[in-house]
Image: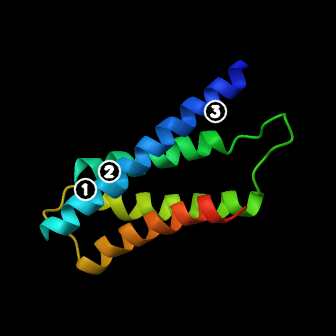
């Protein structure tokens, strides 16, 4: 394994941790009946955004992802972070706002898995 592949795998690992934090933090708050942005949601959204940008960097092996897929995932990640970061200090957020964060998170994962 070369250094480039090692970096890609570390970024992918961190990206999955970010997803777990984001979705797990969402699920905890949802099932508790509190629509609040917790630390897991905040950090998960930021980790997803940063590592996703790193994973989208062009590779030299000719195995680059579809640019349209990358744009869709970037837009979703920016929307999620934009919905999370400004609301992080509030005691609660609107139910629809909170559910949109969860829906966009699941949609972003669906794009990653099903768009080939």
Q: Are marks 1 and 2 in contact (CB under 8 Å)?
A: yes
Q: Are marks 1 and 3 in contact (CB under 8 Å)?
A: no
Q: Is residue 4 or residue 54 the one in the foreground?
A: 4
**Is the residue marked by circle 2 packed among few (<14), some (14-19), or many (20+) residues within 10 Å?**
many
Q: Is residue 81 or residue 18 the one in the foreground?
A: 18
* Residue 112, x across and y down, in percent: 60, 58
* Residue 106, x across and y down, in percent: 46, 66
**Is the residue marked by circle 1 packed among few (<14), some (14-19), or many (20+) residues within 10 Å?**
some
**Is the residue marked by circle 3 packed among few (<14), some (14-19), or many (20+) residues within 10 Å?**
some
Q: Which residue is mark 2?
A: 42
Q: Please name which of the two marks, 1 or 2, marks the residue nearer to the observer.
A: 2
Q: How is the image coloured?
A: rainbow
Quadrant the N terminus occupies: top right
Q: Which residue is most to the bottom?
A: 96
Q: Please name which of the two marks, 2 or 3, marks the residue nearer to the observer.
A: 3
Question: What kind of element bears circle 3?
Answer: helix
* Residue 105, x across and y down, in percent: 44, 63
* Distance in Å between CA atoms under marks 2 and 3: 23 Å
Please give the name of the residue rendered at 75% of the width and 51% of the height, measured from the top-left corner: 65
| Depicted 70 relative to depicted 2: above or below | below
- Where on the picture, by quarter, is residue 4? top right
Please give the name of the residue rendered at 60% of the width and 64% of the height, measured from the top-left corner: 111
Q: Which residue is most to the right?
A: 62
Q: Is residue 38 or residue 32 the one in the foreground?
A: 32
Q: If you read the primary sequence from the N terminus, does the residue marked by circle 2 or circle 3 appear first?
A: 3
Q: Is residue 44 left or right of residue 114?
A: left
* Residue 43, x across and y down, in percent: 34, 45
Q: Which residue is mark 1?
A: 88
Q: If you read the primary sequence from the N terminus, does the residue marked by circle 1 or circle 2 appear first?
A: 2
Q: Which residue is mark 3?
A: 8
- Residue 83 shows up from this direction: yes
Q: Is residue 86 left or right of residue 70?
A: left
């Amino acid at each position: 394994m070369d250094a480039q592949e090692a970096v890609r795998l570390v970024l992918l690992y961190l990206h999955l941790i970010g997803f777990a934090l984001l979705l797990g933090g969402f699920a905890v708050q949802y099932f508790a009946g509190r629509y609040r942005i917790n630390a897991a949601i905040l950090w998960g959204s930021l980790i997803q955004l940063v590592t996703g940008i790193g994973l989208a960097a062009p590779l030299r092996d000719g195995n680059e992802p579809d640019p349209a897929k990358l744009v869709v995932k970037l837009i979703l990640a920016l929307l999620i972070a934009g919905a999370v970061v400004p609301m992080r200090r509030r005691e609660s957020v609107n139910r629809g706002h909170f559910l949109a964060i969860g829906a966009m998170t699941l949609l972003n994962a669906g794009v990653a898995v099903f768009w080939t």
